[in-house]
Amino acid sequence: MPESKVVAISHEKGGVGKTTTTVNLGIGLARQGKKVLLVDADPQGDLTKCLGIANPQELTLTLAAAMNSVISETEFDPRSVILHHQEGVDFIPANADLNAVETTLVTTMDIDRRCVLRDYLGLLRDGYDYVLIDCRPTLGLTVINALAAADSVIIPVQAHTLAADDMDGLFKTVGRIKKSANPGLKIDGVVMTMVDSRTNLARNTIREVRGRYGSVVKVFASEIPYAVRAAEVPSKGQSIYAYDPNGKVAQAYEALTKEVLAIANRERKARDNNAR
């Protein structure tokens, strides 16, 4: 098993903090000395915008170009689509071209349509400690590709009843991918996001999630609070650490980063023990 780890940040509902978590967890890992690649697997390009690309539609070298090269089996420099962010992470941008890739995946018969992204990232992952994939909020072939490529999944859940209710669908999807395309896929945990601890709704939702799912999957101790300054970050092209380094959201993502690193450390020790 490679030392690098590919993590899909996924939830079938939009607006739950997937992109924000991908960016701030990724940069948090880089701040801990890890080499990190972020992958924008959403044709809306929100992660790409968050990392400073104002108009992703102007880009020609994106995840779509890389996946098309795998589908068509054409020669392609796998690193040619990688950009670098000043806070120490590499990233692969995306734009609406990824919608056309999904259409191509639906019709292609010559390859395993679920594993195109895995094949592509296999050319890159040895150069990184972590690869984080920001998934789109639907169950399409690009999300299936992300789950087939990943070693594990982190599920952001907004502290709101409706967002929590949608978790069962994602668990079923992960189970199907585990059976059919990626037997090693695991759920690293659920992270509660946009938590307004002053409200009964948030407190009750968190209690419900921990009570209902805590015996099945890890629910991270770190909870990401709602903050106005955090909501401003996506338009700034930087992480919460750069924009509001002393704020409670930065502190929460730093704590989440340490929890994620602890998972990898336990996995590494288990592999070492099994190898003896």
Image: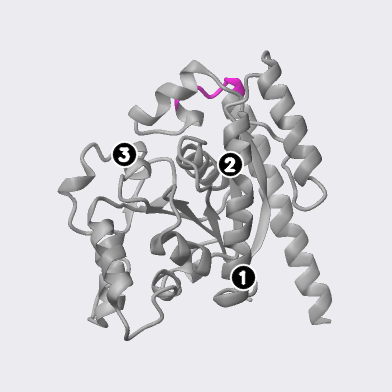
Residue drawn at 46 percent across, 29 percent down = 242
Residue drawn at 22 percent across, 59 percent down = 61
Residue drawn at 63 percent across, 19 percent down = 196
Disc sitting over residue 49 in the figure = 3
For the stretch drawn in magenta, what is the main secondary structure?
loop
Q: Is residue 19 left or right of residue 160?
A: left
**Secondary structure of residue under mark 3:** helix
Eye-nearest disc, 3 or 1: 1
Give coordinates of residue 160: x percent, y percent: 61, 28
Eye-nearest disc, 2 or 1: 1
Q: Mark 2 points at which residue?
A: 156
**Secondary structure of residue under mark 1:** helix
Q: Circles 3 and 1: CB distance less than 8 Å?
A: no
Q: Can residue 221 be seen in this view?
A: no
Report crowding for label 2: few under 14, some 14 to 19, many 20 or more residues within 10 A (C-alpha). Answer: many
Read off the magenta span.
243-248
Of 274 and 156, nearer the camera is 156
Q: Is residue 178 above or below residue 240?
A: below
Q: Name the residue under label 1.
A: 178
Quadrant of the rendered image containing residue 198: top right
